[in-house]
Amino acid sequence: MCADTSAVPKKLPMEEHAGQLRISEIFLSLQGESRSVGYPTVFVRLTGCPLRCGYCDTSYAFQGGQWITLDAILAQIATYETRHITVTGGEPLAQKLCVDLLTHLCDAGYVVSLETSGALDVSAVDVRVVKVMDIKTPGSGEVDKNLWQNIEHLSSQDQIKFVLCDRNDYDWAKQILKQYQLLSCCEILFSPSHEQMEAKTLAAWILEDKLQIRFQLQLHKILWDNEPGR
């Protein structure tokens, strides 16, 4: 649990908006990370998140947004004429109807990925969805929120991401790789926290230790400095 509970948003009043999701934004961009980096992708960003990571770059999605029906979301996505869809947040699974949205997108023939913190149960997510799960490091300030049972629900198509803030995070992540045998589970991504860790430093550590993981930089931050809607 967070020590400062006042920082956690109140539960979204889902019962007042049956059949709708609270959406922060829907936009077309290039996928900035994960295995599908570089593909034109429609991002559906859901409002709300129970975590408060120190390096969060989407705090504008903690509150606000607009309630939209599933049909209206699908109709808007269709106007972009692209195959790749990413559902993100905030923490998208904080809204129960997110699971239905993911299934509807798969049924419509899209290549669907879910960006999730790993703090909420992923067991109900459609097996066709590529889960990109972010394991929170000590440097994030939210390491206690990791729901380790989620690892049991990952397959070889999924990915686990570590955003690393410093050497302590790196050493901790290496221990987690070993403890949970993550390299035999799915693809592992190591990423330097933007403006907190030098990318070259992380790259050197990975090469020195001969880690069989994927190093990644966030393309959207290189191109657009993480502008909302890009």
Image: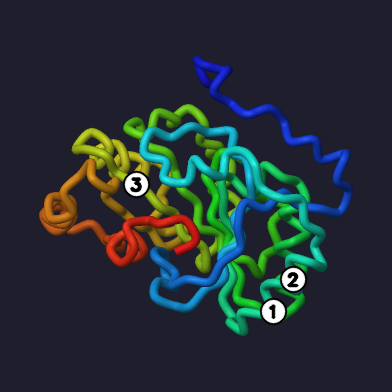
Residue 70: quadrant of the picture: bottom right
Nearest the eye: 2 or 63: 63
Name the side, left or right, on which 123 lies relative to 220.
right
Viewer can see residue 213: no
Q: Residues within 10 Å of mark 2 (few under 14, many from 20)?
A: some
Identify the residue at image location x=39%, y=75%: 38
Q: Is residue 109 above or below residue 12?
A: below
Say which label, 2 or 3, has the lower sequence index. 2
Above-or-below relation of 182 to 94 = below
- State yes or no: discs 2 and 1 in contact (Cβ < 8 Å): yes
Residue 180 appears in the rendering: yes
| Image-based side of 43 in relation to 138, left or right | right
Question: Residue sitting at 28 percent across and 48 percent down?
Answer: 194
Q: Is residue 71 above or below residue 131?
A: below
Front disc: 3 or 1: 1
Task: Identify which residue is drawn at 30% across, 63% down.
Answer: 214
Measured from the top left, where is residue 40 in percent x and y? 48, 78
Question: At numbered mark 3, what does the secondary structure look like: helix, strand or loop?
Answer: strand
Q: Would you name the residue on which mark 3 appears?
A: 163
Marked residue nearer the N-terminal end (3 or 1): 1
Q: Which residue is mark 2?
A: 74
State left or right for residue 20 relative to residue 52. Answer: right
Q: Identify residue type, mark 2.
A: Leu
Q: Secondary structure at mark 2?
A: helix
- Separation (CA) of disc 2 from disc 1: 6 Å
Mark 1 lies on residue: 78
